Image (cartoon, helix red, strand yellow):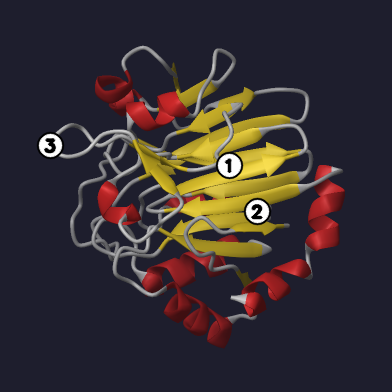
Amino acid sequence: MAAKVWRCSIYAKSVAAMLKGHMDITWFPNSWVRLRTDKSVIYFDPAYLTTYFSKYIDKTEFSKWPDPIDGLPNGLEKADYIFITHHHKDHCKKVTSDRLRNSKTKVYAPTSCKKELGSTFQTVKPGDNLQLDAETSIRVINAYNTETGSSTRKQHKKGKGVGYILTIGSLTVYHAGDTDFIPDMEELGNIDIALIPIGGKFTMDIDEAINTTLAIKPRIVIPIHHLDQSPEMFDLKLQKKNKMKCIIPKIGQTIKL
């Protein structure tokens, strides 16, 4: 793990310069990511499921089965912004989002999340561009399974889910959501940090994720939505094709950029 963080640290000065300050990133399964800067706290796809936190100790569970499971990793701050990619329960869970929000938090999600979230969010769709504050903007793109993609369970239909390109200062972060490789990815522009699913089954597999990463050409790639796939294998195969910087965070590990 130390090697992963060291390789990322090569870019510490450039990331800091783009942000004009501090940034760190924390991952929780499946695709739950926290980004913190000097000015804001941002979450993608916060959704607490016991299955994925069974071996994670630093947490609090507020209810037990057979009641709806309500839990949270300890020490998480309230959000300024929450971005949800689609309606599946490992990405969209109202009780989790509610625990991370206050009266000022803004939540963004596609219309497929309405059944779970009710009226507590702002609807977004592919093609939307939103200026959130003076330094922060979001671009919404498609995320879906394709007939030719490596996903084996085609549960993500076009129009139901989204991906996000977050811009903070001159830094861009791409959260792909649950998707195979799609044509939109060839037109993303400059991406500094790419969060790419690798698990297969519901998303692209490792090999397709590598080809996606090579097409996007981010400064740093972080494999997410692993399921039973190995992020270390993703990195090993990636390095054979391109010496791109790859971070593989442990669950709950905060990495400074």
Residue holding disc 3: 66
Real-space CA distance between mark 3 and mark 2, rounded to the nearest whole angstrom: 43 Å
Q: Position of residue 13 (x, y in %)?
A: 86, 60
Numbered tag placed on residue 165 in the rendering: 1
Does residue 183 sit above or below 4 in this rendering? above
- Nearer the observer: mark 3 or 2; the answer is 3
**In screen coordinates, is 176 left or right of 7?**
left
In terms of image quadrants, where is residue 165?
Answer: top right
Question: How far separated are the C-alphas under marks 1 and 3?
Answer: 37 Å
Mark 3: give few (<14), some (14-19) or many (20+) Cα within 10 Å: few
Secondary structure state at the residue bearing disc 2: loop
In the rendering, at what x and y percent does residue 19 appear?
Answer: 81, 44
**Residue 10, image x and y in percent?**
79, 70
Q: Which of marks 1 and 2 is nearer the N terminus?
A: 1
In this figure, which residue is indicated by the disc labeled 2? 191
Residue at the far bottom: name it: 240
